[in-house]
Image (cartoon, helix red, strand yellow):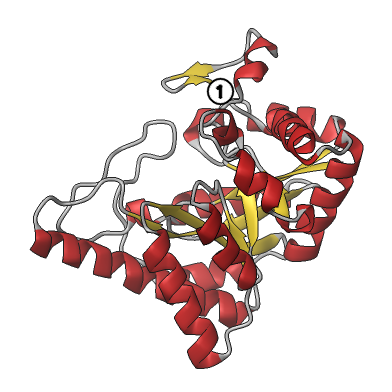
Amino acid sequence: MLIDTHAHLNFKAFEKDADEVIRRSLDNDIWMINVGSQFATSKKAVELAEKYPQGVYASIGLHPIHVSSGVLKVKTDSEETEEKEEVFDISFYRQLAVSSKKVVAIGEIGLDYYYRPKTKTRLEVFKNHQKEVFLEQINLAEELNLPMILHCRFGHEDLIEILSSKFQVSGFKINGVVHCFTGTLEQAKQYLAMGFYLGFNGIIFKLDLGEVISKTPLEKILVETDCPYLTPPIAEKDFSDSTVFSGGRRNEPFFVKYVLERISRLKNISFEEAADITAENARKLFRF
């Protein structure tokens, strides 16, 4: 069994064939968690999960790039959703989380400073809005006793500071995964020391993360696709008639095997052993 711990079959990129892609994955013993980025995509993730007795799960949350700050226009992604900015309402997400036993995490949540205001004053407002919403969603995860799926671009120092403070001040015990990890080895060690897992996907074919992967215990690694994005180059030969979208060949859970193959080579272990351990990691963290 393989478990894609971060998929987006709840996005517009799959609106015409999500069920076909899910069936292909399940037929190949690949399970998945579809991760929300806003309320609309979180709701869709839950709806998809409810259609299948097992193997398809949901995570709900507001992605930092969609947090309404009033100082920056949100960049639109036509493959995701029509909605752009959102004011976080914890009551909506709380209700959605408890509506289904298939909701296994809060996420993806975190910090994203990739697109940011240019002036110092606006940048401070922008960052503070993201931090405030992130803290609200951390508190929701704690309230519901659900793990977190964390997103971070160009904000690892702030993210680590927030999480460290929660652990030190309140005895915070909720864990989770830093999805699509692209930080430094030192940052990886800090996340691991707090009990978090690291998630790796097709980005490992673009960035040199060999040392991080080699020095991260396999028992703390999860594999993912982040589909429809970050398609492994080797996957281009599969399903030659499959959907091509604005970012290139569309990724899907079936391609998580290529990520695992790369990790198993870096770890100098068999694919089967890597599959067994990473799947067990996912089932332990998300409790399914």
The x, y position of residue 105, in whole percent, is 63, 63
Q: Classify the position of the C terminus by image quarter.
A: bottom right
The x, y position of residue 264, in whole percent, is 79, 37
Q: Which residue is mark 1?
A: 250
Q: Is residue 87 above or below residue 278?
A: below
Which amino acid does the dot numbered 1 rest on? Arg
**Is 264 positioned to the left or the right of 14 in the image?**
right
Viewer-proximal residue among 107 and 192: 192
Residue plotted at (73% across, 62% down): 286
The x, y position of residue 135, in whole percent, is 42, 75
**Is 219 positioned to the left or the right of 270 in the image?**
left
Viewer can see residue 5: no
Mark 1 lies on a secondary structure that is loop
Residue plotted at (54% across, 83% down): 167
Residue 21 in which image quadrant = top right
Residue plotted at (62% across, 76% down): 174
Viewer-proximal residue among 275 and 23: 275
**Is 279 positioned to the left or the right of 273 in the image?**
left
Total count of labels: 1
Viewer can see residue 3: yes
**Is 265 positioned to the left or the right of 117 in the image?**
right
Q: Classify the position of the N terminus by image quarter.
A: top right
User: Mark 1: few, some, or many residues within 10 Å (few <14, many ≥20)?
Assistant: many
Viewer-proximal residue among 172 and 93: 172
